[in-house]
Amino acid sequence: MLHSVLGAGWQREHQADRLCEALEAGDLAALEDLLRALLAGIPHQWHGKNPKGTYEGWYASVLYAHFAALGVEVRAEESGSRGRADLVVRGYGRVWVFEFKMRERAGPGAALDQLMARGYADRYRGLGEPVHLVGVEFSAETRNLIRFESQIG
């Protein structure tokens, strides 16, 4: 595990290490906590009066960059026969298929419902790896995720 030394003997575990561990273990609660913390750390000045925080693509870009920095396979807007998943992450013997929604534009549960209804994960089922469907809803008001639902399928 990677560690950095801060001052006289102080150590902290990198968020990237914890994210890798959550992906490897299939720990959905840890994944949710880490993504919430990541988004909570974005300064409010970066949101400003710019409407970017009202679009799911802005949040998807932040998460894409975070996952891509880990060195795992990351695919944005992964097209299939019935639509496209917002983000697919493959690594550590697992596949994570994400759908993102803005709460202000979609009802509760819409992200996971869309994943299941359109079969975005079907193309990964023959790999012999667990496939996690993850519906994430963001709020422009809180500037963070407000619903994180998952299903292994």
Image: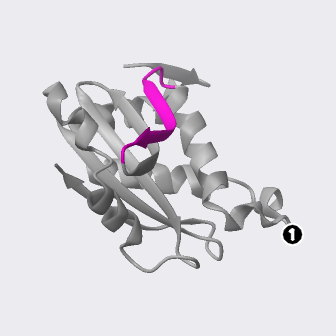
Residue underneath mark 1: 49
Q: Which residues are magenta?
A: 70-81
* Residue sticking out furthest to the front: 81
Q: Does the magenta portion include 76? A: yes
Q: Does the magenta portion include 101? A: no
Q: Position of residue 9 (x, y in %)?
A: 51, 22
Q: Position of residue 107 (x, y in %)?
A: 44, 80
* Residue sticking out furthest to the left: 128
Q: Is residue 68 visible?
A: yes
Q: Position of residue 23 (x, y in %)?
A: 31, 36
Residue sitting at x 83%, y 60%: 45
Majority secondary structure in the magenta region: strand
Apparent side of residue 10 relative to residue 48 in the rendered image (left or right): left
Residue sitting at x 29%, y 35%: 95
* Residue sticking out furthest to the right: 49
Residue 47, relative to residue 18: is it above or below? below
Q: Is residue 129 visible?
A: no
| The N terminus lies in quadrant | top left
| Amino acid under disc 1 | Lys
- Scheme by which the image is coloured: one colour
Residue sitting at x 62%, y 45%: 62
Q: Quadrant of residue 44?
A: bottom right
For numbered disc 1, what is the local secondary structure?
loop
Of residue 2 and residue 134, the one placed in the foreground of this image is 134
Residue 131, relative to residue 28: is it above or below? above
Near mark 1 (Cα within 10 A), the count class, few <14, some 14-19 or many ≥20, is: few
Of residue 15 and residue 24, the one placed in the foreground of this image is 24
Residue sitting at x 65%, y 77%: 141
Q: Position of residue 32 (x, y in %)?
A: 38, 54
